[in-house]
Amino acid sequence: MDLIPHLIDGKETESGDGARFATTDPWTREPWAEVALGGAEEAGAAVAAARRAFDEGPWPRMGFAERGAVLHRLADLMEAHRDELALADTTDMGKPIADSTSKDVPRSALNFRFFADHARLAAGDALPMDSGHHAYTRFEAAGVVAAIAPWNFPLMLETWKVAPALAWGNTVVLKPAEDTPASAAILARLALEAGMPPGVLNVVHGYGPGSAGEALTTDPRVDRITFTGESGTGRAIARAAAANLTPVSLELGGKGANLVFADADLDSAVAWSIRAIFHNAGQVCLAGSRLFVQREVHDEFLARFTAAADALTIGDPKDPVTQLGPLASHEHYQKVRSYLDGAEADGGTVVTGGTGDGWVVRPTVITGAPPTARVRREEVFGPVVTVTPFDTEAEAVAAANDTPYGLNAMVFTENLSRAHRVSAALRAGTVWANCFFVRDLRAPFGGVGDSGVGREGGNFSREFFTEPKAVVMAV
Ligand code: NAD
């Protein structure tokens, strides 16, 4: 069986005690590779390497153009190794290969290109003062960044953190999720091949609590922690980081509302709503898992939406025609199943869906779930959606905002004023009007409430991954 090693200080290594764990292919439900299992020792070694590379190495001292050239070369190499990277994520977590190949890997390469160019082109402020003093800003690299990632978009979310951190001159220790170690190991290898000095990008594998993840969050030599994952884990990381006053960026869970008004283009609303909940088998923080449909069109929408859900191609994620594969792990499958099992007792009706073969959950549509139902309140993180009718705009907004989460929401309407009005009233970090998942990497990305702390993207990533300095000069 293959071994997926750590990459520390430019060297592929096993753990000091030789500890390993297996990573499982959720379609075959068999282990497919062994992974070096890191703990405090390996996390500490990786932080030490990143610290040395930051304090003494060339990376933070290079110009933006030179650093950017390395990041662009890395993006080229990722494109050249597209199939290998795509297969790694698909084998690790069951994402359809068509998505890994055509969406995740290209977007991951774009993350490096975008942030390399953004850092090179971004300007500081020049502030000529009335007093005759001249003030200006400098954006200086923060230092060592710990990046802790989830399993649902492994490579894409890792590069979303690693790319801006590196572009601004930081060094990084990346801990991929334990379910999806493979693509990060390839990324680290390609970074060396692209000419990144040893110690600049380190990858340590392991678990969270009591393992490599927790060790990174308590290490005083770490200057920034960027985390994407569950809200409960975010709280634990914020507590750990508080001891060292380490700044954290937390991109957490969601319970996205999707509002379909009677004046929407229904063809488009059905197509986007299907993507919003069933893409990546619903294992998306941004999933539109609470659909609210205006009563006049509710029955027609539900019929068309349910038919489109039933028409999705379920199967082997390595088959290019598959649109929905298995859930990422047995543990996660059991969690999602518990919501299906409880839905009817909570007052809902399963219109279509339920469990499939192995760790598959079929596209599941639930009606009649009251606002108190677990499936309507908690993040299911699977292909499960509740559909609820509403009458007025005010009622729709109130229902959408009735959640501790606030990552994103969608609104479908052909009425321009309504689109603006509702977008303003929704409590969410991102609102998509008549679309879903469309990203501009300059835009702020993050959530309110239990969905997170801080924003990343464009200048927002710059603020987090640098120490902005003011220089005030008498002239
Ligand atoms: P998770 O919180 O279980 O794990 C995420 C990472 O944190 C893993 O690498 C894990 O090993 C590590 N970890 C766990 N406990 C830790 C601890 N105490 N200290 C340090 N590290 C620790 O999340 P997951 O199940 O991998 O991912 C799914 C969650 O991520 C969902 O809630 C989803 O909504 C969220 N998510 C959010 C976004 C976003 O941008 N807001 C994007 C994708 C996923």
Image (cartoon, rainbow, N blue to C red):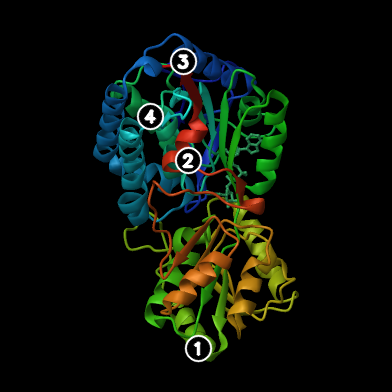
Rendered location of residue 256, percent (x, y): 57, 63
Looking at marks 1 and 3 on the same chain, the residue that comes earlier in the sequence is marked by 3
Q: Are marks 4 and 1 in contact (CB under 8 Å)?
A: no
Q: Quadrant of residue 361?
A: bottom right
Q: CA distance from mark 1 to mark 3?
A: 58 Å
On screen, residue 364 above or below 469: below
- The amino acid pointed to by label 1 is Val
Residue designated by label 1 = 297
Number of the front mark, 1 or 2 = 2
Looking at marks 1 and 2 on the same chain, the residue that comes earlier in the sequence is marked by 1
Q: Would you call the spot at circle 4 few (<14 residues within 10 Å), some (14-19), or many (20 or more)?
A: many
Ligand 1 within 8 Å, label 3 CB? no
Q: CA distance from mark 1 to mark 2?
A: 40 Å
Number of the front mark, 4 or 2 = 2
Q: 184 left or right of 15?
A: left
Q: Secondary structure at mark 3?
A: helix
| Res 258 label | none
Residue designated by label 3 = 54
- The amino acid pointed to by label 3 is Phe
| Res 167 label | 4
Residue designated by label 2 = 460
Q: Residue at x 67, y 25 (%)?
A: 218
Q: Residue at x 43, y 39 (%)?
A: 459
Q: Secondary structure at mark 4?
A: helix
Q: CA distance from mark 2 to mark 3?
A: 22 Å
Q: Secondary structure at mark 2?
A: helix
Ligand 1 within 8 Å, label 4 CB? no
Number of the front mark, 4 or 1 = 4
Tell which of 356 and 213 is nearer to you.
213
Looking at marks 4 and 1 on the same chain, the residue that comes earlier in the sequence is marked by 4
Q: CA distance from mark 4 to mark 2?
A: 14 Å
